[in-house]
Image (cartoon, rainbow, N blue to C red):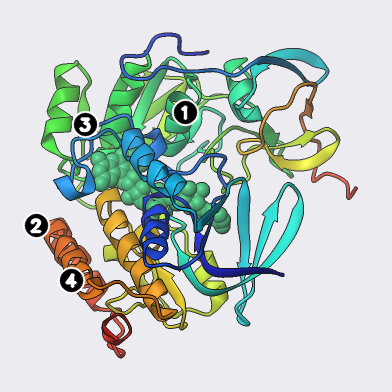
Amino acid sequence: MKPVEILVVGGGPAGLCAAIQAAEMGSKVLVVDRNRALGGQLIKQTHMFFGSEKQYASTRGFDIAQILLDKIDQMENIEVMTNTTVLGLFEDGVATLEKDGKYIKVKPKAIVVGTGASEKTLAFPNNDLPGIYGAGAVQTLMNEYGIKPGNKVLMIGAGNIGLIVSYQLMQAGVQVEAIVEASPTIGGYLVHASKIRRMGVPIYTKYSIKEAIGTEAVEKAVIWQLDDKWQGISGTEKELEVDIICISVGLSPLSELLWQAGCEMKYLPELSGYVPARDENLQTSVKGIFVAGDVSGVEEASSAMVEGYLAGMSAAAYLGYSLYNTKELREDLLQQLNSLRHGPVGERINKGIASILIQSEAAASTEA
Amino acid sequence: MRIEEHPILNFKRGKKIRFFFNDQEVEGFEGETIAAALHAAGVKSLSHSIENHRPRGLFCAIGNCSSCLMEVNEEPNVRICVEELKDGMKVKTQKGKGDIL
Ligand SMILES: Cc1cc2nc3c(=O)[nH]c(=O)nc-3n(C[C@H](O)[C@H](O)[C@H](O)COP(=O)(O)OP(=O)(O)OC[C@H]3O[C@@H](n4cnc5c(N)ncnc54)[C@H](O)[C@@H]3O)c2cc1C
């Protein structure tokens, strides 16, 4: 069995920041990601990020990933394994990994889980046809591999991801026929929406998809208007000639490993699904298992990074590592999280977190 | 369809390699996934549902959804969205659930 001090599961912004912080405090870290490249969602993001300066706002997503990766490269006590999937976290503390068809067991002293989130899908007739993608898949094809998924697209969902991916599709030369949004208002930022509207793309609110049409792949999409009970109104159908339907109706935390490890979980719509109970230091109900990023509640890269630093700090502190200014750093991170979670969205997230917060020896471990 | 011009991105593709899709020779690039290379070649129908044999395409592209399972070098149920393309690979449409090797 491979000896490991801190295992970080997932190398997205949350996992990378956790690794950097834990290593800075002197612990030895192993970062495992099932993807070929580290960076998580960031490597697909060509747009400039929102957030504040401390979280690299106004920097493009893939450039933020590079900043973090350069730091990781410089740290001797961080080992990275890519193309490696964490298959299980067992009750006796053993984690199992798979790489190139080989099965590896490790027994870390602490674990930070930063597995991110997976996309939700939507039920409608023929929703399994080729040509219907999650927004993330479209981004992976276009922005990672430089491949156009098709020629004409219907986007479902006008949250930030739907709007941003629509814009990215246009940059790749794909025509966006329409964006439909079931709720009466556009969920994403209006700057994004206006930019897209100016380019001639209609955004239909209170509209959804009725069905997809095609035999071997998508040939058409039928959209219709929704009434106040979110039911389709017959007679309002519009047929669109598209070969891509892109679904962008939100994400849910990828928390299977936490379930398996025996962490206390709760369904919280505010955090987009089943999420782990955690204390202020991001330790779950299982001692030594910490969480950060979308897996603990779907938010943003900015908060994922701050949570990552905090979880990494807590994991290192749990093993007895500290810096002369751990306490100040911790206060600063909590402060950053606070200021990121403002406005109606932030309030909802805070409400969600408050309802699963473990009031254990709170700060005790990091303040020791 | 490959994107040749992009306002922000600059694609550095790896070495050109060849592989087989249902015995037909297809081109791809080193460093990309099988799914990416097949998409570039216009192949969108990847797996088929077990009972009704409905075609399935790429959906999540990160190894979560199992919508892209194919037979690769005779091994069934390979998630081709996360499997790296290698020179000479034999990729086939899978029939049924796949046999135990
Ligand atoms: C289109 C789009 C636009 C966005 N724009 C912004 C923005 O402008 N500003 C902003 O702040 N945020 C933005 N976000 C959100 C942001 O990208 C995410 O909130 C953030 O990436 C979450 O970070 P994470 O580290 O928790 O998860 P992820 O980035 O999803 O990383 C998780 C990692 O874990 C790995 N993993 C999962 N399971 C396993 C396993 N079992 N074994 C090994 N590895 C595993 C995955 O491969 C992945 O690399 C955007 C997201 C999208 C999709």
Q: Chain of mark 1?
A: A
**Does residue A274 show up?**
yes
Spatial separation of the CA atoms under disc 1 and disc 3: 29 Å
C-alpha span from label 2 to label 4: 26 Å
Q: Chain of mark 2?
A: A
Q: In the image shown, does A17 or A268 lie closer to the viewer?
A: A17
Q: Nearer the viewer, residue A277 or A282?
A: A282
Question: Viewer-nearest of labels 2 and 1?
Answer: 1
* Farthest left residue in view: A343
Which element is circle 2 on? Answer: helix
Both labels 2 and 1 in a single chain: yes
Question: Is residue A219 shown left or right of residue B70?
Answer: left
- Of residues A278 and A312, the one nearer the viewer is A312
Amino acid residing under circle 1: Glu
* Measured Cα–Cα span from mark 1 to mark 4: 38 Å
- Give the CA separation, mark 4 to mark 3: 48 Å
Camera-side residue: B65 or A105?
A105
Question: Tag 3's secondary structure?
Answer: strand
* Residue at 16% in and 57% down: A340
Residue carrying label 1? A144
| Residue sticking out furthest to the bottom | A361
What SS does tag 4 mark? Answer: helix
Near mark 1 (Cα within 10 A), the count class, few <14, some 14-19 or many ≥20, is: some
**Residue B49 appears in which quarter of the rendering?**
top right
Q: Is mark 4 within 8 Å of ligand 1?
A: no
Expressed as whole percent of the image width and height from the top left, the position of residue A74 reads 43, 47
Sequence-first tag of 4 and 3: 3
Q: Nearer the viewer, mark 3 or mark 2?
A: 2
Residue at x-position 37% and y-position 40% = A65
Give the residue number, with chain letter if any, for mark 4. A328
